[in-house]
Amino acid sequence: MPKDSGEKVVATNRKARYDYHIEDTVEAGLVLTGTEVKSLRAGRASLVDAYGSIEGNEAWLEAVHIPEYTEGTWTNHAPRRKRKLLLHKQEIVKLAHRVSAGGYTLVPLKIYFLDGRAKVELALAKGKKEYDKRHALRKKQDDREAQRAMSTRRSLGD
């Protein structure tokens, strides 16, 4: 039984939902070195420019920044190295087929620990156009204004 139970989120890619239409999500394991795990447990990681790729029959996570472990020695890892993803062969084939068909990319949404094991939530996503982003911002702003108007009306009615 692992020491940690449940889900502990380390890093999220908040901009991904703004920049992409999320079609499908997949949970994948991460192959990490010891100092990477320690750095993640300290809550240090960034998914800003990260993306997934499929080469041959293997899935990879690239450009994720996991800073060097502060207490590490010469065994420390490279902060932006390519990391292997653990997926079933059928999942890799399905993702490879959708990505190679065009228009789709693999975007990591979050890195987290699930029952003590490092996982990444990977999304099959299609890029948004500029007008889609403006539309999403406008809708969010309208919803916020409506919520604010309803709350002020509720407080005046009491």
Image (spheres, rainbow, N blue to C red):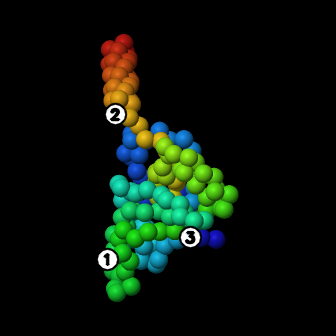
Nearer the viewer's eye, disc 2 or disc 3?
2
Question: Disc 1 to disc 2, how far (Cα)?
Answer: 40 Å
Q: Which residue is mark 1?
A: 70
Question: Disc 2 to disc 3, how far (Cα)?
Answer: 45 Å
Q: Quadrant of the N terminus?
A: bottom right
Q: Nearer the viewer, residue 111 or 80?
A: 80
Counting from the top left corner in percent of width and height, residue 9 is at 46, 56
Q: Residue at x 36, y 68 (%)?
A: 80
Q: Nearer the viewer, residue 14 or 24?
A: 24
Give the label on residue 111, or none: none
**In terms of sequence position, does the residue under pointer 2 or pointer 3 come before the other?**
3
Q: Which residue is mark 3?
A: 3
Q: Residue at x 33, y 80 (%)?
A: 71
Location of residue 146 by image quarter: top left
Q: Which residue is mark 2?
A: 130
- Pointer 1: residues within 10 angstroms few (<14), some, or many (20+)? few
Q: Residue at x 54, y 41 (%)?
A: 23
Q: Secondary structure at mark 3?
A: loop
